[in-house]
């Protein structure tokens, strides 16, 4: 590698730029620090600017200064330093940036394609969390907790995250930032802004490129967890009159990652024909499960036979096997990725080896017009296009000890399934997705006297395509399976009205009437439907509409807030939220009798949306100018939770008398409750302390999962907790520093951060739990004029405990352990990383 020489060249370049720019742009010394916790923070949690300590909503604002002070550069960093949020990056055998599910307040979606938290840039919806990380040096990030359907619309069941851009003005300025660190870790970021036409049009253009080698080593020395990203963005602000502001924003980004940093805990040994134990099982308990994982509706007993399953109970053991994967990019792999047939993403735009390639485009425009002193009209429109492909090693370990052409099934015959394309057992697997959406919104707000209000309308149209395929044998177009188009069109009419009953007491009533039109289309190869149980029987050519359904819901919110004093506010709220429905189009692939039996057994092609009712109380305030605090308690009732289930359908053609159909159903019900608090204290000009903590608990009332029941034998999940979320989380940051007398705007600081997340369950049976994780980060910096130099160490104590967990399988050539969960996929953290960063402002 040429990492060392590149690092030296980059360091030299940064030093030169810092020296030259610092001399050229010398400026007057800055004012003495005030010793306060900072001025008012304005947020847009209700689509209008409000003081964070006076808006009656639970919202955390991470300002640009805080982002820099904590070294937050990704969604994972943001979640790690924010209690009450987890990022689940583990899905279908891989734990990487292709899948980042935001779990807020313990509301973990039960399916990988569902979401309970939506993302926005300047209030415009974006396709995925990765686009939030792509915004270069934002003004702030707003994390809004609780149902936000009234203002932000669909998929804001648990909350919303909004990134707010910095707006350029009449002054020229900019910055250049460079960072170098261990493991060839480097970042180069630059921006420039200024007027195009003074008082009329200004711009801000920004770009960023970062790259790092992974923390973990494969058996061949290859690093696992390599990541790189490049981003370019342009923001143009136009003020044709004092009453009108127009903002145009566009962004392009590309993520190019190597094989993920992940591993597995295995419940069984994998033994090669030579007798070599390739991976050792670490199971610490044996469960009595069931071969079907579903209740026979006739007898009320499990439909399958009892079976003993090795697995994990309690906090999982430390990783006992080496972290390995077969991720060498051979000609065999390259020819597979070059196939254009049965693909969702053009091979030229797809990944060229193991890892991830994602390309995103985002554009939006906003228009604000102060019609009068009390009336304001706003409009916004947005567009997103995201395509990504990832090639993973589905088996997840070094399987070279399993040769091709061996009788693994012990039947005296070498079956075609025992002839492996790589010459040994391996399971390359390609996953790809294409998402495109367009949204538009218009709203009219009023603010005069005791009455404040907003009315508006919004529209969203989103298309999604997904494809996948792979295997252990020959990798041809036949193993690739592109799915059909999924489309949703959402129209919303929303309002919000606040009336000041007195100078200190206000009542707000908000609501959204939402119309969701969901459609699912036949896959490109077409579909033959053998029964008219759900839709008319016949052959549906590729792209033909299979099912469409319209859902209409009203989601209100009522808030009462009391400004007890200028420095203290309390509030209480009641809100409802709705999460979009889903289709069970896989039912249509079954035989005619099975479809009819599934219908008779209660199967549905279109299931209902999920619903939540949320109750919340909160307090916000400050004590003098040195202490600021917020706290909230909530109780939420999540109903019609969508679960993956198995329908037992009578079928005389089967020896068992039944067919088993995989579907989704509204089979779950969960109560969630918790307390969240944060505070910032600056007792002296020398010391600042900020802290936050969250207790987020869940109590399952009803739940169904075929896979979990087959593993555990548990069918009654009442009293259990939701998976993939931390019940306890906290962070504390301590910063010391002051100005340096005699220096031109000279100052220094030293900061330490502790971030804590308690362990997460791997499934709703609450069997296996990941360990608690503690991450300690530290930074120190020196500023002289426009030049800042910082050194940092992240994960100071080199914590190696996993950051995500999910049930999965041990893959062997005879697939003996894939009928039920037999392994845990663990997402691995970035290990200790040290570096130096230089920034020049001008």
Image (cartoon, rainbow, N blue to C red):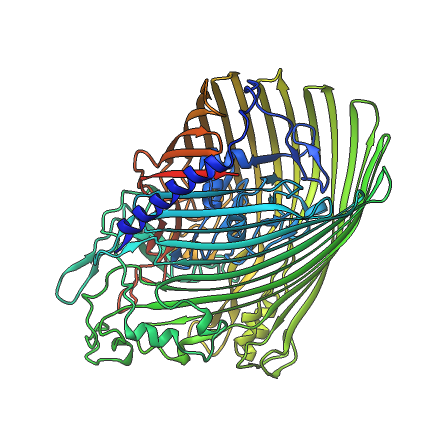
Q: Nearer the viewer, residue 103 or 337?
A: 337
The percent position of residue 503, horizontal first and vertical second, equals 81, 22
Q: Nearer the viewer, residue 439 or 138?
A: 138
Tell me: residue 70, above or below residue 270: above
Residue 266 in sight = no
Q: How many marks?
A: 0
Residue at x-position 71% and y-position 19%: 566
Q: Quadrant of residue 53?
A: top right
Quarter of the image with the N terminus is bottom left
The reply, left or right, for residue 223 in relation to residue 777 is left
* Outermost residue to the front: 24
The reply, left or right, for residue 730 in relation to residue 452 is left
The percent position of residue 28, horizontal first and vertical second, equals 55, 26
The reply, left or right, for residue 559 in relation to residue 223 is right
The reply, left or right, for residue 369 in relation to residue 460 is right
Tell me: residue 618, above or below residue 762: above
The percent position of residue 782, horizontal first and vertical second, equals 41, 28
Residue at x-position 78% and y-position 35%: 508
Q: Quadrant of residue 357?
A: bottom left
Tell me: residue 575, above or below residue 653: above
* Outermost residue to the left: 274
Residue 374 in sight = yes
The percent position of residue 676, horizontal first and vertical second, equals 55, 30
């Amino acid at each position: 590698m040429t990492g060392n020489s590149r690092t030296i060249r980059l360091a030299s370049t940064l030093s030169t730029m810092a020296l030259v720019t610092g001399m050229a742009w010398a400026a007057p010394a800055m004012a003495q620090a005030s010793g306060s916790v900072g001025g008012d923070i304005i947020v847009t949690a209700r689509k209008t600017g409000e003081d964070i300590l006076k808006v009656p909503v639970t919202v955390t604002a991470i300002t640009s200064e805080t982002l820099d002070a904590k070294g937050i550069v990704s969604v994972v960093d943001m979640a790690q330093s924010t209690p009450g949020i987890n990022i689940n990056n583990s899905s279908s055998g891989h734990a990487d940036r292709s899948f980042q599910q935001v779990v807020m307040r313990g509301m973990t979606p039960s399916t990988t394609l569902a979401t309970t938290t939506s993302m926005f840039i300047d209030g415009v919806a974006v396709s995925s969390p990765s686009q939030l990380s792509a915004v270069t040096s934002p003004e702030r990030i707003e994390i809004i907790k609780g149902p936000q359907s009234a203002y932000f619309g669909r998929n804001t069941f648990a909350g919303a995250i909004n990134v707010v851009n910095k707006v350029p003005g009449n002054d020229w300025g900019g910055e250049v930032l460079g960072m170098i660190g261990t493991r060839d870790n480097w970042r180069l970021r630059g921006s420039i802004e200024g007027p195009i036409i003074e008082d009329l049009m200004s711009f801000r253009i920004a770009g960023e490129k970062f790259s790092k080698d992974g923390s973990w080593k494969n058996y061949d020395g290859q690093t696992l967890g390599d990541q790189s990203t490049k981003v370019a963005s342009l923001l143009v602000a136009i003020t044709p009159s004092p009453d009108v502001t127009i903002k145009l924003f566009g962004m392009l980004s590309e993520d190019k990652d190597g094989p993920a940093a992940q591993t597995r805990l295995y419940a069984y040994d994998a033994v090669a024909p030579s007798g070599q134990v390739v991976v050792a099982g670490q199971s610490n308990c044996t469960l009595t499960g069931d071969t079907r994982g579903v209740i026979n509706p006739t007898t009320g007993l499990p439909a399958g036979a009892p079976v003993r399953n090795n697995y994990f109970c309690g906090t999982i053991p430390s990783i006992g096997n080496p972290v390995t994967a077969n991720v060498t990019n051979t000609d065999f792999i390259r020819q597979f990725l070059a196939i254009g047939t049965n693909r969702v993403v053009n091979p030229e735009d797809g990944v060229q080896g193991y890892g991830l390639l994602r390309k995103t485009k985002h554009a939006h425009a906003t228009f604000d017009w102060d019609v009068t002193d009390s009336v304001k009209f706003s409009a916004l429109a947005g567009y997103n296009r995201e395509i990504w492909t990832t090639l993973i090693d589905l088996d997840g370990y070094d399987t070279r000890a399993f040769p091709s052409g061996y009788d693994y099934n012990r039947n005296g015959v070498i079956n075609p399934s025992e002839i492996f394309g790589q010459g040994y057992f391996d399971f390359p697997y390609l996953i790809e997705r294409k998402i495109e959406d367009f949204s538009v919104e218009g709203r009219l707000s009023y603010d005069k006297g005791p009455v404040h209000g907003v009315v508006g309308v919004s529209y969203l149209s989103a298309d999604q395509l997904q494809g996948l395929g792979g295997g252990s044998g020959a990798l041809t177009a036949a193993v690739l399976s592109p799915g059909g188009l999924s489309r949703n069109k959402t129209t919303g009419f929303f309002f919000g009205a606040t009336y000041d009953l007195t100078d200190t007491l206000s009542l707000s009533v908000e609501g959204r009437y939402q119309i969701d039109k969901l459609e699912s289309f036949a896959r490109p190869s077409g579909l033959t439907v053998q029964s008219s149980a759900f839709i008319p029987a016949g052959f549906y050519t590729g792209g033909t509409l299979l099912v469409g359904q319209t859902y209409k819901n009203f989601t209100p919110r009522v808030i009462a807030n009391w400004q007890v004093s200028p420095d203290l506010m309390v509030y209480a709220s009641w809100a409802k939220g709705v999460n979009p429905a889903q289709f069970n189009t896989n039912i249509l692939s079954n035989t005619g009798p099975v479809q009819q039996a599934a219908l008779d057994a209660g199967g549905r092609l279109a299931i209902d949306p999920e619903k939540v009712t949320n109750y919340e109380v909160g307090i916000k305030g400050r004590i003098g100018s040195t202490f600021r605090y917020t706290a909230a308690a909530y109780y939420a009732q999540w109903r019609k939770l969508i679960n993956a289930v198995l329908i037992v359908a009578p079928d005389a053609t089967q020896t068992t008398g039944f067919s088993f159909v995989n579907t989704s159903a509204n089979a779950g019900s969960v109560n969630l409750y918790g307390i969240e608090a944060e505070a910032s204290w600056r007792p002296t000009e020398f010391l600042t302390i900020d802290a936050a903590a969250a207790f987020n608990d869940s109590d399952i009332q009803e739940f169904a999962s075929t896979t979990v029941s087959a593993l555990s034998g548990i069918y009654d999940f009442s009293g259990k907790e939701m998976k993939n979320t931390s019940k306890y989380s906290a962070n504390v940051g301590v910063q010391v520093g002051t100005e340096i007398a005699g220096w031109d705007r000279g100052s220094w600081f030293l900061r330490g951060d502790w971030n804590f997340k308690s362990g997460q369950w791997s499934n709703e049976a609450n069997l296996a739990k990941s360990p608690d994780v503690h991450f300690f980060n530290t930074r120190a910096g020196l500023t002289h004029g426009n030049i800042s130099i910082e050194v940092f160490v992240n994960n100071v104590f080199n914590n190696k405990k996993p950051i995500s967990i999910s049930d999965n399988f041990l893959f062997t050539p005879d697939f003996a352990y894939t009928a039920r969960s037999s392994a845990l996929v663990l997402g691995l953290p970035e290990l200790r990383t040290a570096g130096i960063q230089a920034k020049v402002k001008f």
